Amino acid sequence: MAHATRLLEHVGWRGYANFDMKFDPRTGRTVFFELNPRLGGTSFYITAAGFNTVQLYVDEWVRGQDLSDRPMLEASHEHVFTAIPLRLLQRYVTDPAVRPSFDRAVKAGEVTNPWFYKAERHPRRWAWIAANQANYVRKYREHYPEPKALV
């Protein structure tokens, strides 16, 4: 967070920003790939973590509130956001520093998969979702090694 904050402050950014990052187990470092200065297609994870993103847009752009002095918000609510099947994800979360909070969130039902939208009732859509989820399992079996516990 400190690196991301410094970058945003350096460029004078105000508003939402998503970072694409990847943890490199060879070096133990997290690497930034890109900064997306917008809400992305999977940004519901922000709402799931306790922040209503639309409310801030409405406050600023519809109600005309000055939000420039608002402090940076950092979510602390534990929530699992995944597009892959939860059982598959459970196999790959092996980091002992992460697993307890992951398990707590799952046990509490704090899990969101954006594909599962209850208002969508068309059978073809649900057939596509079932195929999509099965395809994730197939791809993981084919392309990803068996998970190993991190030390």
Image: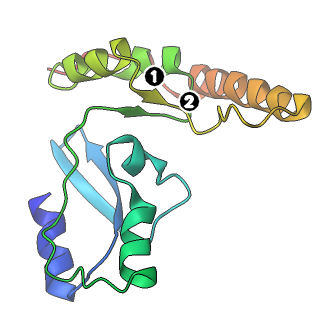
Q: Identify the residue position indicated by label 1 in the image.
A: 89
In this picture, residue 95 sits left or right of residue 93: left
**Location of residue 117 in the rendering, given as x and y in whole percent from the top left corner:** 66, 35
**Do the numbered discs 2 and 1 sit on residues whose CB atoms are within 8 Å?**
yes
Q: Relative to residue 32, is residue 125 depicted above or below? A: above
Near mark 1 (Cα within 10 A), the count class, few <14, some 14-19 or many ≥20, is some
**Location of residue 137 in the rendering, given as x and y in whole percent from the top left corner:** 63, 21
- The front one of 132 and 125 is 125
Task: Please tell me which of labels 2 and 1 falls first in the chain.
Answer: 2
**Location of residue 132 in the rendering, given as x and y in whole percent from the top left corner:** 73, 31
Locate the N terminus by quadrant.
bottom left
Amino acid, disc 2: Ile
Near mark 2 (Cα within 10 A), the count class, few <14, some 14-19 or many ≥20, is some
* Residue 32: quadrant of the picture: bottom left
Q: Relative to residue 59, is residue 103 depicted above or below? A: above
In this picture, residue 81 sits left or right of residue 136: left
Which residue is at 46% across, 81% downward?
62
* Residue 149: quadrant of the picture: top left
Q: Identify the residue position indicated by label 2 in the image.
A: 84
Residue 56 bears which disc, if any? none
Kindly report the distance in space between the C-alpha atoms of the residues bearing marks 2 and 1: 7 Å
Which residue is at 26% across, 32% downward?
78
Q: Secondary structure at mark 1?
A: helix
Amino acid, disc 1: Leu
* Residue 148: quadrant of the picture: top left
**Location of residue 4 in the rendering, given as x and y in whole percent from the top left corner:** 19, 66
Locate the C terminus by quadrant.
top left
Q: Secondary structure at mark 2?
A: loop
Q: Relative to residue 65, is residue 108 depicted above or below? A: above
